[in-house]
Amino acid sequence: MARYNAKESETRWQSVWSARETFRAANESALPKSYVLEMFPYPSGRIHMGHARNYTMGDVIARFKRAQGFNVLHPMGWDAFGLPAENAAREKGVHPREWTYANIAAMREELKSLGLAIDWSREFATCDPAYYARQQRLFLDFFRMGLVYRAEADVNWDPVDETVLANEQVIEGRGWRSGALVERRKLSQWFFKITSFADDLLHGLDQLERWPEKVRLMQRNWIGRSEGLRFSFDLTKAPVPSIEVFSTRPDTIFGASFIALSPEHPLTEQLASKDPKLAQFVAECRTGGTAEETIETAEKRGYDTGIKARHPFDANWDLPVYVANFVLMAYGTGAIFGCPAHDQRDLDFARKYRLPVLPVVIPEGTDPKTFAIGDEAYVGPGRLANSRFLDGLDVESAKAEVAKRLEAAGKGQRTVHYRLRDWLVSRQRYWGCPIPVIHCASCGIVPVAVENLPVVLPDDVRFDQPGNPLALHPTWKHTSCPKCGGRATRETDTFDTFVDSSWYFVRFTDSHADDPVNRAAAQYWMPVDQYIGGVEHAVLHLLYARFFTRAMAKAGHLAVQEPFAGLFTQGMVCHETYRAVDGGDWLLPEEVEKRDGGAFQRGTDIPVSVGPSEKMSKSRKNVIAPETIIDAFGADTIRWFMLSDTPPERDIEWTQEGAEGCWRFVQRIYRLITETEDLPPAGTKMPEVTGVDLELRRATHRAIAAVTEDLSALRFNRAVAQIYTLANALGAAGAVSGAVRREALETMVLLIGPMMPHLAETCWEALGHKTLVAMARWPHADPRLVKSDTITIGVQVNGKLRGEIQIPREAEEEIVKSSALALDSVQRALEGKPPRRVIVVPGRIVNVVA
RNA sequence: GCCCCCGUGGCGGAAUCGGUAGACGCGGCAGACUCAAAAUCUGUUGCCUUCACGGGCGUGCUGGUUCAAGUCCGGCCGGGGGCACCA
């Protein structure tokens, strides 16, 4: 019996697709378009199982869409700037450029061996000068539009990677790449004004119906819109006349018992310059920084400045002004009024410094006289009390009343605040896109002239000393000012690599265009119809890309506001972990052998302790290289595994047994096709059929309908199950006519086409076709064959299943009722009593109520 | 602490609208083929009970709505994720 030779078949079809440019996408077509994209990879050198899963899913969609008659764009490129290249340069002495392009070459071959339906003619790497030159052009546009600025700010400094980070890149106080505790530093840095789109980015989420709700929620929380009132307190014994605060609870103004300033507040700094004790307090607050332990202990501390603030509604009511460690300069105005009864932090603070705690919002149905605050602030709804003109109002009305009065008095203004901060984009690293500006002593910051772009990275840099290699380069930064012609220096910071990935999907629409964007091509392809990637980018890449798209639209490059109409976030690939003994060294899966219900080190009797399934990682050694699976079983097996069993959004566990099962199915399909004798030639007309023929035809068309529906909804695991069901039906079918068997087999091949494309081509050829499955149209389900004429429905007595009946699909209710009641099991359950009621749900169930 | 999601056989999971729970796969068991093994094929596989027919139980726990609940509602328990002094 001939076995399917995956290796030979896969190499062969890959070269056929390549030679015929099967997957090359045209930028104009009479067909409807579909842009399918997976998040492009960082060229680490090797593809891992996560890549295999991600790109398989995208490939299935791309091939499915193509079969359904869409003009499909499915490109690939490389997110190629970034620190690993510099680290490799330091460790191995290889230039980041060489290292990166060698990795790209290796990974390209591995990706190609997966048989992806990609238009490789559009490939580029973000470190290609041709790409980053256009990015610099976009920067100049943004600069002109006022979307870029340079400012001194408290920023996150990663001491290991020796660069600053954006807020989104600090996870639990640590750098997203290095894992190092982030320090706060005051530095002059470049920012993109993402906050000017805050409201738009927030509201745009409502329209993204094909995004996971989870991601939209994470972005909503990250943008963090809150409505409140900004108003001022007059000060006495102070160097400034008043202090402005922001509050979302102005209704609690009569419960105020103190004012608190951030340690970084300008007034604090002014006071500290004359008050050494305060200066020391501020210094103590600063040392804590964002370090983990400080946040966890989170003790509220304050310093009484001696200044008094006058209550805005009572000239005789003075509040103490503190500097407090829990007030953030970066949010609101950097100053608050504290209302201990209705804010937990304020309450902790007030208890410590023995400040009054006066409840002013009383829960409905509670007596204001007996309502007291213990250790917990009351933050729920209720009616105002102890609040003069606000007494009796609900919280919302009271907020409005306070706002109205303070606005009328010219002391306050309703405002909206966002948690979102501007995107810090400068990095003190070499291997990134140079920021195209020049610093001139007399003209200040001057953008590089368009005709002088690109600002190209120098090749001759040294990595044998700490710091930014660009800044340390002896000559590169020296240039002349475009404005005055005098001596000037180049900016030595480069862009955050998230800038590179914020518009690559637009560049794919015409990756050879002279302008950053070929408007016509972008107009045709954008937005991406289906984007696929990891959920870890929910508030990083996916937020930045939404901002960039808006900024590019504003600059006239694009007509769309949202880059990704559909988003899918796939789960991770996991594997069991192995250790030599409990707590011992980690072992690679290939070092472990399973037999007799136990696990042992390969070739020995030394037992291995098996740990839980975790995300594949080098540190746990629980990795399987896709390459080894492709070598052993072929790409179709790994693809089939990635689509089977586990829903795509969940984590999938890689198992050897599962992979072998997939391989067996590949062989089974091949046998089903090649061991069938006496098939009529392709294109034979289907006769009218009955009996077993009709049953197989029904199974075939039910499979078409089900797989079509499941693939459309990205339910790959269910589509896989439907194909198994069809294979089972084919295997079980007895003496069916040749035409019927051919239809079933051809359908099977077309249905697996997007998932196991090489096997499909081989089978298609074996069935006598001269065409490619990759070019074939998706099969059409005949609705008359999808639904059968007779159906089986359950019969319940008092909600308990007692039997089932077979009835014509369109049977009259009375007939259904009587055949249900005629069942022995029903009569037994009724114990001779007449039924009180019989509920017939057509096509579903009969329930007899006794 | 706040917000969100998820709990179904030995395992991954299916059940789209409240209507026959466990499709499909993995694993297990039994058999066929074989000198034997691999491969392949067939049957079987939620739990308890029964010689059998059958009966009982069953979707984390608990209460409710309904003719009918894995699905809807309330309370709890467990797991995962996001944010974390955001005023």
Image (spheres, helix red, strand yellow):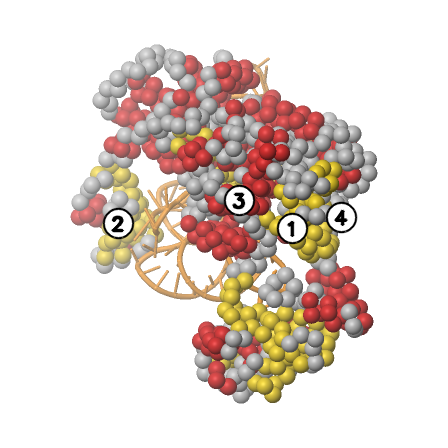
* CB under 8 Å between discs 4 and 2: no
Where residue A792 appears, as percent x and y from the top left, is 29, 40
Distance from disc 1 to disc 3, alpha carbons, whole Å, reads 18 Å
Q: In the image, what residue type sits under mark 3?
A: Phe
Contact flag, marks 2 and 3 (Cβ < 8 Å): no
Residue A150 - label: 1
* CA gap, disc 1 and disc 2: 69 Å
Res A841 label:
2
Discs 3, 4: same chain: yes
Residue sitting at x 57%, y 85%: A314
Tag 1–tag 2 contact (CB < 8 Å): no
Q: Is residue A322 above or below residue A608?
A: below
Three-letter amino acid code at the position of disc 4: Pro
Residue of label 4: A159
Q: Nearer the viewer, mark 2 or mark 3?
A: 3
**Callout 4 and callout 2 share a chain:** yes
Q: CA distance from mark 3 to mark 4?
A: 28 Å
Q: Nearer the viewer, residue A680 or A472?
A: A472
Q: Residue at x 48, y 21 (%)?
A: A758
Looking at the rendered structure, the kind of residue marked 2 is: Val
Mark 1 lies on a secondary structure that is strand
Sequence-wise, which precedes: disc 3 or disc 4? Answer: 4
Q: Which mark is residue A162?
A: none
User: From mark 4 to mark 1, how far is it between C-alphas?
Assistant: 22 Å
Decide: is A804 above or below A400.
above
Q: Chain of mark 2?
A: A
Mark 3 or mark 2, which is nearer the start of the sequence? 3
Mark number for residue A548? Answer: 3
Q: Is residue A562 left or right of residue A700?
A: right
Q: Chain of mark 1?
A: A
CB under 8 Å between callouts 3 and 4?
A: no
For badge 1, the amino acid type reads Arg
